[in-house]
Amino acid sequence: MDKNILGFLEGQNKEISVLSKRMNLAYLDAIISGKVELYKKYEECALGVEEYFHNKKNFELIKKYLKENISNEIIKRQLELLYRTYLGSQGDIKLAKKIIEKSTEIEKKFNTFRANVDGKEYTDNQIKDVLRTETDSEKLKKFWEASKKQAEAVNKELIVLVELRNELAKSLGYKNYFEMSLDLNEQKEKDIDEIFSELYKKSEKAFSGIKNEIDEFLMKKYKVSEMKPWHYQDLFFQEAPKIYEINLDDYYKTDILEKAKKFYDAVGVDVRDILDKSDLYEKEGKYQHACCMDVDSEGDVRIVENVKNDEYWMKTTLHELGHGIYDKYMDFKLPFILRGYNHIFVTEAIALFFERNSNSLKFIKKFGDLKKIDEDEITKTTKKILQIEELVFLRWAQVMYYFEKELYKNPRQDLNKLWWEMVGKYQKLNFSRDKPDWASKIHFVSSPVYYQNYLLGKILVSQLKVYINKNILKKEKNNYYGDKRVGEYLKKNIFVQGKKVPWNILIENATGEKLTAKYFVKEFCE
């Protein structure tokens, strides 16, 4: 092996690890506090990372080394990943700085926004509570519209951001930023389109039936003859409305964090150190959603949440800790460049794999607040709830994916109209208004071209469940609440593998077959 390559990679691993940790800590400080000066510090760190990967001399060296006959797969894989990272930063550095500045500015507005209703400010948690519990249709509309006001504050800037991203992508030889993002993340638009098209067709009958059931229930509840977006108990109809007598919140009225600790103990992983370092409750100016951050790829893993004792935050906590254990149990002997989750959608799959448990009878019996229940009834109902949740999210993810694709194709088209056309097609929600409601989704700013990964993750969850049940637990039905073999399988076959191989090879090695939608379809669409 050429000593120059080894020396180059040693320097890259060391320098990137320092820059990454600095940026991650700055981001955490900013979103937890909401302070302008800390967002500015994060912006400076992000610019530093961008400038580092803009180095054209290093990029040329990487291209040169990749042409050599390298037999060591660990060395070769590091160079391949570095190539993609450097490629994304080879455009005009001034343009890259503009993108980071604009993105940080918009994200700060999102994170510090509070909906105003009749002179009183409401957090996202409070808005969600109103949408879930209020029965007055006019009040629901008022709160829904108040939350959407954040879109009017950012939509024009967001279009500018999209155009800046497109400009950068075109300078690197791509049609637009959407195409570039997929390529740099080892994904192909054609492959995703095929999977999404299959899921759309095969879920049509099941989703139509569920949508009718939801509408009938909610129209009676709200005493309306026509459904509007504010009637679905969620700002985007991305989560399933509560249409059954069983209220899962009743089972999570005490210390959901303790429940999460015990659950993860039962599958052979410890999350206490993650929770001890995390920021878990509401604060003024704080980021209102949830995320997981691997600070240094050396064991400092934290989550950010706004916890309440209910099923939503039980599910969310299981989800974020799923990301967390992936990062915690990586192989720290690997070079820094190869540490961490294999692909974005693979870590989403692990998070979703554990998230699903919050509405399972087995989980509720073992970890929830239960006294006396009709087990047959709750099993039947929770199974139906899970199907509704998965199909509702499936259709919502398609809205996001296809809308974002069109957004980057032409950001100056009538996006307000396009948004509601997408909502009508995929979610079967017939509504429209000439407002930039699409821009109220923070993912367009903070996680662009990302939503396909949630759905690919859900597909992989179903595939993993079938494999684990059949080959690890030797059972037909999932029953891993207390089985440490599940944790051991995930650690060995996914977590410690890091980024040593592309995602398609990782999945085939771990499950015996390539990524397939057939298990998701069988589980939720048939």
Image: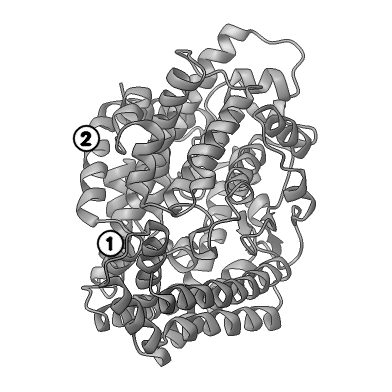
Above or below — where is 432 with respect to 329?
below
Above or below — where is 172 with respect to 111?
below
Marks 2 and 1 in Cβ contact (< 8 Å):
no
Task: Give the structural element (helix, strand or loop) at label 2.
Answer: helix
Q: Dot 2 corresponds to which residue? A: 201
Above or below — where is 154 with respect to 357?
below
Q: Position of residue 191 (x, y in %)?
A: 22, 49
Pick the front one: 334 or 111: 334
Neighbours of disc 1 within 10 Å: few (<14), some (14-19), many (20+) = some
Q: Dot 1 corresponds to which residue? A: 405
Q: Position of residue 446 (x, y in %)?
A: 50, 66
Q: Residue at x 30, y 44 (%)?
A: 426
Q: Quadrant of residue 170?
A: bottom left
Left/right placement of residue 514 relative to residue 368 reads: left
Position of the N terminus, as image quadrant, is bottom left
Left/right placement of residue 241 relative to residue 38 reads: left
Task: Give the structural element (helix, strand or loop) at label 1.
Answer: helix
Pick the front one: 306 or 7: 7
Which kind of residue does numbered mark 2 sit on?
Lys
Neighbours of disc 2 within 10 Å: few (<14), some (14-19), many (20+) = few
Which kind of residue does numbered mark 1 sit on?
Lys
